[in-house]
């Protein structure tokens, strides 16, 4: 079946005219790509290219993956022939592009507009600043400073492949830094036993190779690290350094394949921690460890059927309007911790009534109502930080109104939820 995928691509280059469409046709007829500008009116909006990729797939479910492979081919060749960057921004739709009668319904997979900037996790406090000051009392060697830099970059980058690579850079630096000067025995390539020279009556020796130093570091940093884990990490590193991707070697990796990033990242953190004096870790330091280093994103996807118009060239016009697919955030942006307030059953009934009435803060009241829980015989409502700021400001100003009067009754019970 024929499908067309609608991608948006970030680039420093644009087509020379906004109305011009570049057409790239694969000589083997595997795909056709149509590239055009997406005009913008404000500098606060990033410039994007629209790229429509026509290709064949067995069904709608797998069409997006096939289209992404062809998109990667286009972007690779664009970068190679222009010397500029091209990066997939997002996918918007995959549409059934089989020839059909004008006005017929088409199956469409639609990706919703995701939230551009998620709320942060409220975590930093005075104890973290004190922890950093305590660690900085140690004169960190230059090599470990470089390793900490690669650890930071590995946490921040969005690609799991890059995360693993950056973490490995840090691991190699630490391993080389603490590599012992003592020589080790050469090993048999088959059984790994120490080699012995009968003529010299001695074991040939050498300084530890980088691979051996990394293995020793991993084993020392984590008692639970075994030979199988070291082999997994080493083979993954070799594959990535020779141009493969984690997805391409997923058959040799745990499920999901990107979890190997966490396997390396957690052991790297332990190796870095061991570079500081042991007496510093006396229980007074506050350290954070993510549940995963991989940056997952939530996206809404819908399967719909509708009529898709055709442009003057006979291609599907994927800029059709008539519906909007988006993710609605629970509330306004916030960066501080939420608070919990305690209500009586009568106050809860009043909150429910006010949240169903039209008013200036109906959405806020509905958010609070949705977060009501009973615990230990009491009724609690969770209030996000931005809503709590609005409530406190209204109460302090002496504003008059039903919802203001309601919160005056229990605002003093508010406690920050950690």
Image (cartoon, helix red, strand yellow):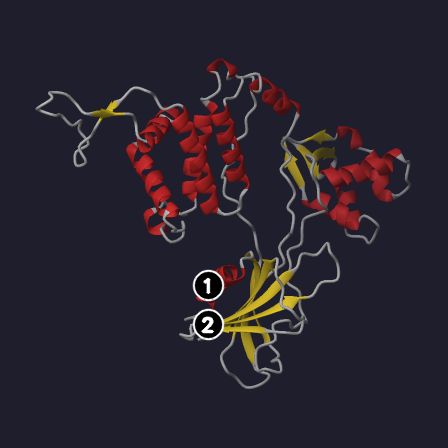
Q: Quadrant of residue 351?
A: top right
Residue corresponding to mark 1: 73
Q: Is residue 357 left or right of residue 340?
A: right
Reply above or below: 13 against 264: below
- What's the residue at 59%, 75% (across, down)? 306
Name the quarter where the N terminus is drawn: bottom left
Q: Is residue 319 left or right of residue 164?
A: right
- What's the residue at 74%, 35% (across, down)? 344
Tell me how many marks there are: 2
Crowd tier of the residue under label 1, counting other residues whose Cα lies within 10 Å: few below 14, some 14–19, many 20 or above? few
- What's the residue at 49%, 13% (across, down)? 279
Residue corresponding to mark 2: 31
Whole-Å distance between the Cαs marked 1 and 2? 10 Å
Q: Relative to the observer, which residue lies in front, 408 or 93?
A: 93
Q: Are marks 1 and 2 in contact (CB under 8 Å)?
A: yes
Q: Secondary structure at mark 1?
A: helix
């Amino acid at each position: 079946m024929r499908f067309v995928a609608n991608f948006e691509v970030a680039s420093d280059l644009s087509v020379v005219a906004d109305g011009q469409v570049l057409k790239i046709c694969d000589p083997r007829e595997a795909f056709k790509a149509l590239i055009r500008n997406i005009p913008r009116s404000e500098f606060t909006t990033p410039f994007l290219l629209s790229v429509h990729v026509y290709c064949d797939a067995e069904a709608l479910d797998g069409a997006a993956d096939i289209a992404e492979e062809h998109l990667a081919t286009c972007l690779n060749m664009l970068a190679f022939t222009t010397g500029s960057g091209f990066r997939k921004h997002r996918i918007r739709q995959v549409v059934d592009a089989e020839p059909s009668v004008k006005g017929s319904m088409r199956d469409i997979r639609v990706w919703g507009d995701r939230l551009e900037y998620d709320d942060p996790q409220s975590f930093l406090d005075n104890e973290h600043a004190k922890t950093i000051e305590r660690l900085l009392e140690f004169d960190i060697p230059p090599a470990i400073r470089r390793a900490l830099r690669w650890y930071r970059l590995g946490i921040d980058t969005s690609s799991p492949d890059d995360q693993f690579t950056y973490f490995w850079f840090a691991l190699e630096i630490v391993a080389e830094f603490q590599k012992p000067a003592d020589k080790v025995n050469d090993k048999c390539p088959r059984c790994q036993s120490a080699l012995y020279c009968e003529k010299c009556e001695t074991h040939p020796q050498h300084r530890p190779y980088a691979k051996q130093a990394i293995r020793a570091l991993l084993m020392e940093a984590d008692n639970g690290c075994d030979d199988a884990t070291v082999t997994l990490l080493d083979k993954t590193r070799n594959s990535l350094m020779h141009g493969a991707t984690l997805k391409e070697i997923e058959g040799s990796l745990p499920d999901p394949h990107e979890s190997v990033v966490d396997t390396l990242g957690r052991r790297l953190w332990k190796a870095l921690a061991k570079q500081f004096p042991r007496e510093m870790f006396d229980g007074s330091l506050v350290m954070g460890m993510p549940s995963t280093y991989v940056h997952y994103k939530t996206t809404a996807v819908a399967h719909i059927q509708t009529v898709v118009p055709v442009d003057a060239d006979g291609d599907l016009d994927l800029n059709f309007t008539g519906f909007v697919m988006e993710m609605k955030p629970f509330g306004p942006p916030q960066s501080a911790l939420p608070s919990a307030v305690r209500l009586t059953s009568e106050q809860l009934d009043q909150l429910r009534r006010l949240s169903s009435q039209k008013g200036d803060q109906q959405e806020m009241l509905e958010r609070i109502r949705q977060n009501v829980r009973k615990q230990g015989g009491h009724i609690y409502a969770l209030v996000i930080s931005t809503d709590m700021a609005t409530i406190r400001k209204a109460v302090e100003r002496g504003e008059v109104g039903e919802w203001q009067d309601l919160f005056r009754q229990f605002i003093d019970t508010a406690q920050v939820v950690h």
